[in-house]
Image (spheres, rainbow, N blue to C red):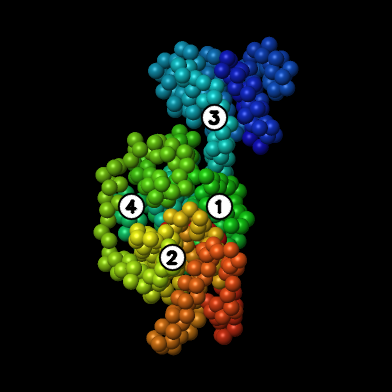
Amino acid sequence: MVFRLVLGCGTVGRQVVEELPERDGGDANRLLVVTDDQSIVETLRDESIPARFGDPTDPSVIASLDAPDVIFVASDRTDVNRTALERARDRFPTASIVAYMGGNATEANRTRFEELADHVVDARGAMVDHVLDGIVSPSADAAIGLRKRLAGIDGRLAVVMHDNPDPDAIASAVALVDIATEVGVDADACYFGEISHQENRAMVNLLDLDLRNLSPTDSIEEYAAFALVDHSRPGVNDQLPEDLHVDIVIDHHPPRGPVPGEFVDLREHAGATSTVLTDYLHRFGLEPRRATATALLYGIRIDTNDFTREVSAADFNAASLLWPYVDASVMSQIEQPTVEGETLETIARAIKNRIQRESVAVASVGMMSDRDALPQAADQLLLMEGVETTLVFGFRDEMVFLSARSRASDVDLGEALRDAFDRIGSAGGHGDMAGAQLEIGILGSADDEDEVESIVSVVEEVITNRFFEAIDTRPGVPVGTYTQTSEWLFDVDDEEATPASERVASEDEGEESA
């Protein structure tokens, strides 16, 4: 429930409070109007709108009120609104305030309103819909909730990305740290794993982003609170304890299970989590730092494939908000990093080893050290004539990592990979971009190179067949039907079959936390 307090009730304020119940859609949100016009109080009460007689500039009146989530300063007079705004901000420092400037504002008034209010409505262009969008829209309510949760943190906040973070996760974490700092909370942008993709490293280095690389042995007891960005469950695609108390979750992927968190914002319509964080910066009235704005725009561009994949109006709006603050020259340098020889070799092996059935191509690159080369190889295969869907996978330590891409309208890669591999590992993603990772415990017990090659060969065959069958749309073909051999192959402990541990692939493949 959101508590909205209206201080003063002039012409614009009156229209707003009368439309609020309809805009709220019948939600049981709380509203109170405080005005020194007794006739307005009586009229509002007749319309079943809670109203109280009182001077909205009187400190004792304001002090007697319960703490609101959002305040609308709504008298017709500029001087009254300025005083009410100053006293409301002093009394309720964490509330979100929308202030109507009135009709006779001086430059000094405009400066003061901008300093104290989260949103300022100028009389020269005031529209009731604009005010309502500022204080009733879902994203406005989310900003109110985030501010309250941040304000309640006593200590340092860890903003945790998923393992081996991509640009969207990195930018989102940096932006949330900026917001927390503005609210007075010390915070760190943290990640496990490594940043190995050349463009991702270029982004971090050129923008001089302050990130903390955690290892599984590091203590996290120094943090009083935890936020997850671009993924939604602790212990899944990060190395946090699964039972960790999470304070904040902000993501754009569809959840695959219950999402813990005191404050949760999952916007599946957004093409990137960076879009959501850009909206928060805007709602908080913050001008993004140049580095943060550049990172956020790059994160949106990567996750939406330059606004061509699963893009929404919110992504375009976020880009327009960010563009004035973006360092275009640095953005250009990020997009043209030096490609390492190993990445090129991985792409070459994928092209050479591909198995193609109609418009679907699958390739194993064998043993590898850079998992971030897989999505680049999958993209390159997709450029080949006659290919509409690709899967590229490779082996590292006792894991096999998979990256898939598709431009076929009748293929949902996220569902296809879950159908094929959820029982033996973890998989997920979007319709045209997905990933998975599987544990191959038996590899660790292999005694010699010949035995390793034999195991890898069998695993390659299983993965290839599972993927082909999972996306086969022919009527009557059961999806994911395999012998017991393929079920126990991926995790063997002392010759006794055990289920594979829950893991997920890098979100560089755009996959959702399983």
At mark 3, the secondary structure is helix
| Mark sitting earlier along the chain (2/4) | 4
CB of mark 4 within 8 Å of CB of mark 3? no
Foreground: disc 2 or disc 3: 2
Image: 233 above or below 36: below
- The tag earlier along the polypeptide, 2 or 3, is 3
Crowd band around label 4 with a 10 angstrom C-alpha radius: few (<14), some (14–19), many (20+): many
Q: Label 2: state its secondary structure.
A: loop
Quadrant of the frame with the N terminus: top right
- How busy is the neighbourhood of tag 3: few (under 14 within 10 Å), some, or many (20 plus)? few
Residue at (29, 66) in percent of width and height: 344
- Residue 310, image x and y in percent? 47, 47
Q: Position of residue 441 (x, y in %)?
A: 51, 78
Circle 4 sits on which residue? 203
**Could you tell me if the residues under marks 1 and 2 are in contact, i.e. CB atoms within 8 Å?**
no
Q: Mark 4 to mark 1: distance in Å?
A: 27 Å
Q: Which mark is residue 323?
A: none
Alpha carbon distance from label 4 to label 3:
34 Å
Q: Amino acid at mark 2?
A: Glu
Q: CA distance from mark 1 to mark 2?
A: 30 Å
Amino acid type at image mark 4? Met
Residue at the spot x=59%, y=57% of the render? 256
The residue carrying mark 3 is 133
Alpha carbon distance from label 2 to label 4: 38 Å
**Residue type indicated by callout 1:** Pro
Q: Which residue is mark 2?
A: 358
Q: Does any portion of residue 282 appear in the rendered image?
A: yes
Q: Which residue is mark 1?
A: 254
Question: Reading the chain from its start, which is encountered first: label 4 or label 3?
Answer: 3
**Which residue type does callout 3 highlight?**
Asp
Name the quadrant containing residue 55. Answer: top right
